[in-house]
Amino acid sequence: MFQLPTVQFTEEQEQFRLEVRDFLQEGMAKGKFVPKCDSWLSGDDPEFSKLIGQKGWIGMTWPKKYGGQERSTIDRYILTEEFLAIGAPVAAHWFADRQTGPLLLRYGTEEQREFFLPQIVKGECYFGIGLSEPNSGSDLASVTTRAEKVDGGWIVNGQKIWTSNAHLCHYMVTLVRTSPFDGKNKHAGLSQLIVDLHADGITVVPIKFLTGEHHYNEVFFDNVFVPDNMVVGQIGNGWAQGLAELAFERSGPERILSTFPLIDELIQELKRKKNAEGLKQASKIVSRLWSLRNLSIGVAQLLESGDGDDVSIPAALVKALGTKFEQSIPEITRLLVQTYPTLDAQRKIDRFMAESILHAPGFTIRGGTSEVLYGVVAKGVVTQ
Amino acid sequence: MSEMKDMILEVVERMLKENVDKDLVDIVEQGNWLSEVWNLFENNGITIVAISEENGGAGGDLEDLLNIVRLTGKYAAPIPFTETTLANYLLEYTNLQVVSEPATYMLSANQAYTLEDGKLTGEAIHIHWARHTKRLVTLANSAEGIHLVEVDLSQAEITPGTNLASEPRDTVKFQNATVSQISNALSFDEIRTMTILETAFQLALMTGAIDKINDLTVQYTKEREQFGRPIHRFQLVQQHIVNLAGETAVALAAFNNFVDALLTNKHSSEVAYARIRFEETIQAVATISHQVHAAIGTTHEHSLHQYTRRLWSWRDEGKNTAYWTDIVATQLLENSSDSLWAYLTGTKLALKL
């Protein structure tokens, strides 16, 4: 079985954690945001993103020449944990910070980096991720949105679906087919294009989430022109480029902490009631959280040391285990305290319960279903 | 971490691989004592790792020792290695002299033994390996409080017993036995520290056994064919493989992280979290591994049970989940002003801006 490194935070890192926490607690006290469960998907607040940008907390690991801080992956891990633990509204800049920036740093042109990264860092430029299509969910290689070469660029036709926050985003990194499907090599012929979501021929149509909230969308492409300089990396290399992002996407604290505000409120509630028996039960949740955090930080440390090949299996495992954990929290909570979940409840635990129950089904679906991850991990373990 | 760690672990793993197999464990489970394996460990200086050099130790630190214990768990090594090394670690911790013969320990504070004028009286049950060891390091109550004492087991009346894994767990009775060494009366914190150490050793053993069960199970899914293909090709079996891998990864990471925390003394709750989580891990690992192995895994001939029976035994020895959840619950109540997150991340530094 793979061995993940352990991480001892330095004193500077502990200080940084407290600095972030202090900032967030003050912001919350001043009413700058209302904490939420699953805030990295549902907490979109451009004003808050700009505030974070001013602190230097978007793209903080990126080179200074693009506006980054050249901080470590572990520093960013700490920052992300603090955002999620309190339930801060980080959804607007989330994907640009987590995925687009690293993608452009790895595969983008100098022109793309210089144009996009400084805007992302300021919290003013948001990206969507255009992967799934109506007939292409887990079987992503079957995407049919196509781009045809024309003079100076590409013409894109087709449709993406489940694109989180596309209605708020400026751009979308879009996986398209640039040569016809080849059954023998189905991962070939895919490319990544940066599509301006305000370009002619784009239609963004909301899909209401089961709560009625607007998080994700359908995005239609009708003869959308994408200039050549918006191709990411190489034409035909989109699958490999996309895979490289996955370890970052799959193993972060957002796969463990989506319902953390509820756990915290559960503990507070049990403490207020001096419910020792309830706290004993809840300490099992704390132990599970601690165990998962060890794994997730271990993967972050592997990513920091750049040992990329070994990361994909543990990263997939962290997502599979972590999302199952966050999904279980409301079901455990309701056995320990009496709640009446509604989204507009005055009582905090009732509101967090409602958010957690209603968002929970998505945890084990988004970013790779558990079934797909199980397949990846099983093959990895067997061939080890 | 000691620089010797990798080298020592490599030597120990090779020793175990070459000298301990299923048949040997079977022989010991029938109540025999195999001095060859013990002598191998003793002659190679493995039994005195983490004892300070001025007390005749071999150097190395607690992390080295716990990792050796982990390996003995991985091979179900049928010797009182954990017992002897923990007994000596406790003796050093309380400023007593270490012992050179095989030893065992008893830390349950159920007041089994009383101490009066340097004489030990009483009866305790489930003492590991007592019949095959020479020295007992045990808690004992006197009028002054609780002490750690070391006593020669030749003075004891020993009634053999076993746990679910057929490991020796004996009843040990003393009547006015002369103790060789007595510690000062121990504080609550010192006794708590000993309990944490005992738990750390147990977790190390469990980690090794879990790791082995994972190896055995993955290997089996590659060798066993049904419907014309190896069973790891079936998605429902893959689900077992991943759940088992997840539990194993959790156990290994928990082990490494609590050892780190133990050595830096940063946050003593890690042992509690690990011990609580391990009971869930053990349940899952035992269930999954037996299901995947199917009928053959339920036979005495197969080695799987040597690990699952040990896990089923060890989880009920020492302090179990009920004890540790109580401690975490109490800590949470005492930190009433803190959020759970502040408690969990354990940053008590003053903010310097």
Image (cartoon, rainbow, N blue to C red):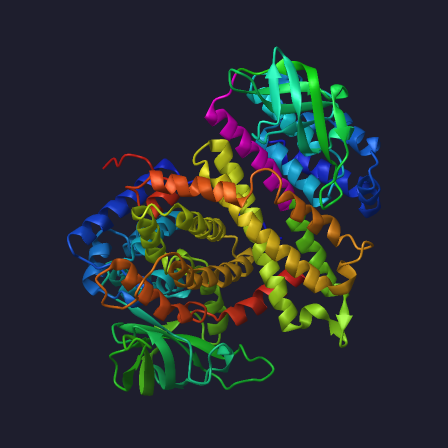
Q: Position of residue A33 (x, y in %)?
A: 20, 58
Quadrant for the C terminus of chain A, please. bottom right
Q: Is residue A5 visible?
A: no
Look at the image and say whether residue B198 sits in the magenta stretch: yes
Seen as rendered, the residue at the extreme top is: B117
Q: In the image, B298: left or right of A301?
A: right
Image quarter of residue A205: bottom left
Position of A219 relative to B195 (above/below): below
Compare residues B319 and B259 and report the one nearer the observer. Answer: B319
Residues shaded magenta: B185-207
Q: Is residue A277 left or right of residue B4?
A: left
| Most common secondary structure along the magenta stretch | helix
Q: Nearer the viewer, residue A35 or B286?
A: B286
Q: Position of residue B118 (x, y in %)?
A: 63, 12
Q: Is residue B212 magenta?
A: no
Nearer to the camera, A188 or A144? A144
How many numbered circles are shown?
A: 0
Q: Quadrant of residue A231?
A: bottom left
Q: Residue furthest left?
A: A30
Q: Residue at x 71, y 31 (%)?
A: B171
| Residue A245 appears in the picture as rendered | yes
Q: Is residue B42 above or below residue A244?
A: above
Residue A348 position (above or below residue B26) = below
